[in-house]
Structures are given as structure tokens and as C-alpha cells.
Image (cartoon, rainbow, N blue to C red):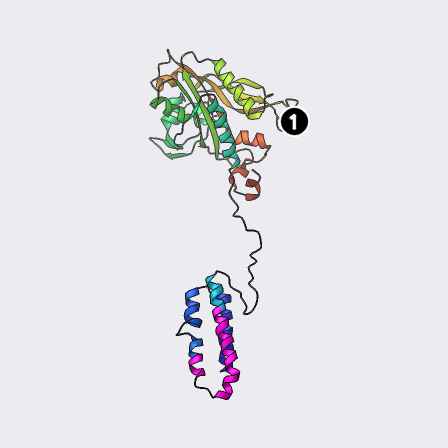
Amino acid sequence: MLDRIDKVLEEIDSFIANASNDVEEFRLRFVSKKSVINELFEEFKTVPSEQKRELGPALNNLKNQAQQKLNELSNGVSSKASGSVSDIDVTLPPVHNSEGSIHPISQVKNRIIEIFERQGFNVEEGPEIDDDWNNFTALNFPENHPAREMQDTYFIEKDPDVLLRTHTSNVQIRLMNKKKPPIRSIMPGRVYRNEAISARAHCFFHQVEGLCIGENISFKDLKNTLYHFSREMFGKDTKIRLRPSYFPFTEPSAEIDISCFICGGKGCKVCKNTGWVEIGGSGMVDPNVLDNCGIDSTKYSGFAFGMGIDRITMLKYQLDDLRLFSENDLRFLKQF
Ligand code: DAH
């Protein structure tokens, strides 16, 4: 019988070590009326009295051990070896769940929104899957015009064309179709282009589009808006430069450069020694675009701009590889 008592002790230990800490199962096996230990007590009644002196204490010890383990299990504390101290150190500081952080692109996007909201812009959104009309034709890209090739497009369907938008300018069109001037909105979002992925190019990235339509809106308003934005975003000494360019949907069009905030315009690696870095495109909305959206171009005028959020984030944090944004490497993301 002593052997069997030892065996039950071992069973208790291995239950604690292996089982899923099922309190009820433990109770049924070792503590309840139908438990092995209770059977041993029944048997104990029948053993000769000279053996009882030896078996009694062993059996009582077994019963106490079982009861103690049951208490520990139901309190959520279990010691893995019988008689040993619990291996949970309740004095240790709690292990914190590591919380996620806001992606650097989202942080920059939120900051951009904040700056423009204070200038009276609201935020609008549009679909990432759109048709040829909203992404190209209504924006004054003529059919078969090489301007379409400025942006390599991912087509989902052909005739009629369904595509992944190549820029956020599609939201300008959707917005002007549903709302009449005055309009003062920014439209952040993800865009797609059929590009080979490298440190400097990706097949998806983020832009923020801006649109301001009203009576007597002039190039001066565009310039002031961008100037204010740049000073808020990159520091109050930032200057802007609008470089003549071409976009089908604006006339005149300009590339937006800001003075390099890293070297202060003196020339460094980031600005490739030019003192200026490009952050997007802009211009006065082409009257054809207004007409395409049913807005009277003889009465209203406006400006538009489109900036790369990834580009601004790279400049702000001096990152040199665009791929970092989408690799989900925690060592990178935890730094923001
Ligand atoms: N859609 C242009 C691009 O992706 C950027 C752009 C340029 C947007 C000029 C505009 C604009 O609204 O006026 O390259």
C-alpha cells in the first residue's frame, strides 16, 4: 500500500506539471469521494492494526498534499513539484503588453491634416479602385495622350477601364461632382503605380491632394497656402519655390520645392547639393476640369496640389529606403 501511496503522489506531481490546470479534474481524481485517495482510505480500514501505525501518517500526508494542491490550483497558483515553493514570483513587476505605435506615414498624414484643417480645409476621401473617367479623362488627360504614360497604371478591367488609382486627383473629380463651390478640401490616400520596387520607388504609396475652388481664387492663394503649410511642417525658416511644370489638369502648373531644412539651403546629401527638395505638384485648375464636373469655369477658379506623404516622411526622418514603410519590421516601427 505504501507503494501505491507513493504512486499517487507522483501522479499528483505529474498532473500539476503537465495538465492544463483543470481544477475540477484534479478534484475528481484526487480529492472527491470517488478519488483514488478515498479508495485508499476505504482499504486502510481493513489492514491489520500493526500496519496502520505506518500507513496512517503516509496516507494523511497524501490527503493533505492533494488538498493543498487543489487549493493552489483553484487560486491560480500551482507548484510544479510537491512540497516546492510556487515558481510564480508574485513580487515581480507586471509584464506590460507591448502596445502598437502609429505608423510614421500615418503620423505625418495626421500632422498634414492638422495643418490644413487650421487653414479651413476639410478632409475628403475617395475610392482606390476607380474608372478611367475619374482618374484620367475628367482630369483632362486626352485619349492616347502620352501624359497617361506619366503614370504606369494597374488595370483591373479593360473596356470600360477599371483601375487602381494612380493618384489622389481622382477624388477632386468625385468631390466637384457632388459638391459645388466654395470647396476647400484635402484628400489623403493610398495610390498605386506599376513600378519596379526599389529604395526610391514602390508600387503603392501615399499622397495628399488639395483642392480650393471659389470666386477669385488666384495663384497667390496657392502660393500662400503652400508657404504656410511648409513653415508649419518643416520649420518657420522654410522657403518655397514653385518651378514651372506640366500636369494635364492644371494650367499653369508648378512643381513644389521647399528649401532643404537639413542644411538650411546650403547643400547636402538629402537635397543633392541643390538646397531644394521637391515635395509635390500644384497649379491652377484647368477650366476644362471644372467644366467636366459641371462647375462654371467663367465664374469659378481654383488651385490644386498633390504631395507625396511617403516622400515628406522620408525627408522629415531622413530615411533613405521607401521599402521600410511596408516591411512591418518592428525594429523600424518601434522608433516612431
Ligand atoms: N497627381 C499628380 C501626381 O500624382 C500630383 C499633382 C500635381 C496633383 C498637380 C495636383 C496638382 O492636384 O495640381 O503626380
33 part of magenta stretch: no
At 46% from the left and 86% from the top, the residue drawn is: 47
Query: Under tag 1, what secondary structure?
Result: loop
Instruction: Compare residues 89 and 311 and report the one nearer the observer.
Output: 89
43 part of magenta stretch: yes
171 is higher (above) or lower (below) than 26? above
Instruction: Compare residues 320 and 193 and report the one nearer the observer.
Output: 320
Question: To which quarter of the image does residue 248 belong?
Answer: top left
Magenta segment, which residues?
Answer: 41-67
- Horizontal and vertical percent position of residue 170: 40, 26
**Can residue 282 be seen at all in this image of the molecule?**
yes
* Helix, strand or loop: magenta stretch: helix
Q: Image check: 91 left or right of 189?
A: right
- Horizontal and vertical percent position of residue 145: 42, 22
- Horizontal and vertical percent position of residue 211: 43, 21
Instruction: Compare residues 85 and 270 and report the one nearer the observer.
Output: 85
At 55% from the left and 33% from the top, the residue drawn is: 200
229 is higher (above) or lower (below) than 152? above
For disc 1, the marked residue is 268
Instruction: Compare residues 4 and 280 and report the one nearer the observer.
Output: 4
Q: Amino acid at mark 1?
A: Cys
For the residue with label 1, is its CB less than 8 Å from the closest atom of ligand 1?
no
At 46% from the left and 13% from the top, the residue drawn is: 218
